[in-house]
Image (cartoon, helix red, strand yellow):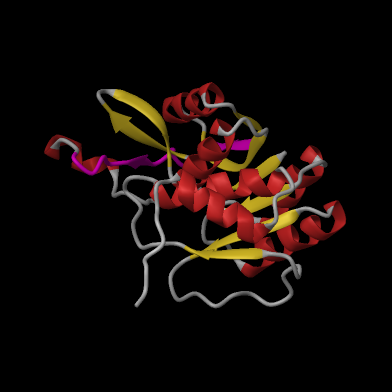
Amino acid sequence: MIVVIGSPIGRVSDGAISAAGTSSRIALAAARTGAAVQVVGKTGDDETADSVVLDLARGGVGHVALLRDGSRPTPLEQPVDGDPADEDLGAPGVDGPAIDAVDVDLGLRYLTAFEVVVVAEPAPPDLIGIVADAARWSTARMVLVLPADAVVPDNLPADSVVFEAPEVDPDGVFADLVGSFAAALADGVEPGEAFRASVESDGWTEVETD
C-alpha cells in the first residue's frame, strides 16, 4: 500500500467538481498503476468534499483516514483556463485544510501496513518527524516533496527520497512523476530504476550533452 499525506481540494471543470491539489494528483497517479493507495489528510465537511471523495474513489484512491473538518470549507482550485466569473474559486495550488501531526499519527496507526509513504505538501517539522518514525517502524520508504529552495530536514530515514516541487504544476506532470515513482517503489523497484521508469512513462527524455 502507498499512503499519500496531504489535504485534497476541489477543481471545477465543465460544471463538475473533481479532486485536485498535489496530494490528490499524486495519489491518483499511483492508483492508475494498479497500486493500493490511501490518502491521509483533511477536507471540509461540505458538498465540495463529497465530490472530491467520490472522484478519488472512482480513481481507486481510498479515504478511510481522510478527516472531515466542518470549521472551514474545502477550497476550490480555479482552472488555468477558467471562466473569469469563477475568479472567487481560488488560485491553482491552493492548499486544503491544514492537518497536524496528531491527525497524521492516528491515520498511519490506523492503516498500519504500507510500503511507501509520501508527504505530498509542505508540512511542519513535527509532522515530518511523525512520518519519519512511522516509516522506520513499518520499514516503509519515505518520499518527501519540498518547495523549491526548502532545507531538507534532519533525521529522515537513510533511504528517504526527496523531491523539489516546481512552483506550479498546472498539467500535473510533476505529480504524475511522483505518483508513478511511489508505485514503483512499492513494487520493490530500487529508487534509481524507479525514477528512470517514471520519467520515461511520463514522456520525458534525457538531454544529451556534448
Residue 43 in magenta? Answer: no
**Does residue 168 lie above or below 3 as drawn?**
below
Residue range corresponding to the magenta coloring: 65-81
Q: Position of residue 41 (x, y in %)?
A: 60, 44
Q: In the rendering, at what x and y percent does residue 207 appear?
A: 37, 65
The front one of 205 and 128 is 205
Q: Nearer the viewer, residue 31 or 123?
A: 31
x and y percentages locating residue 132 in the rendered image: 74, 62
Please identify the residue farthest to the left as the structure is shown.
84
Front residue of 208 and 159: 208
Residue at (62, 37) in percent of width and height: 67
Q: Measured along the vertical axis of the image, is residue 72 above or below residue 209?
A: above
Q: Residue furthest right?
A: 137
Residue at 43 percent of width and 52 percent of height: 174
Residue 70 visible to the viewer? no
Residue at 52% over, 44% down? 26
**Residue 105 in view here:** yes
Residue most extreme to the front: 210
Left or right of 109, for residue 88: left
77 in the magenta segment: yes
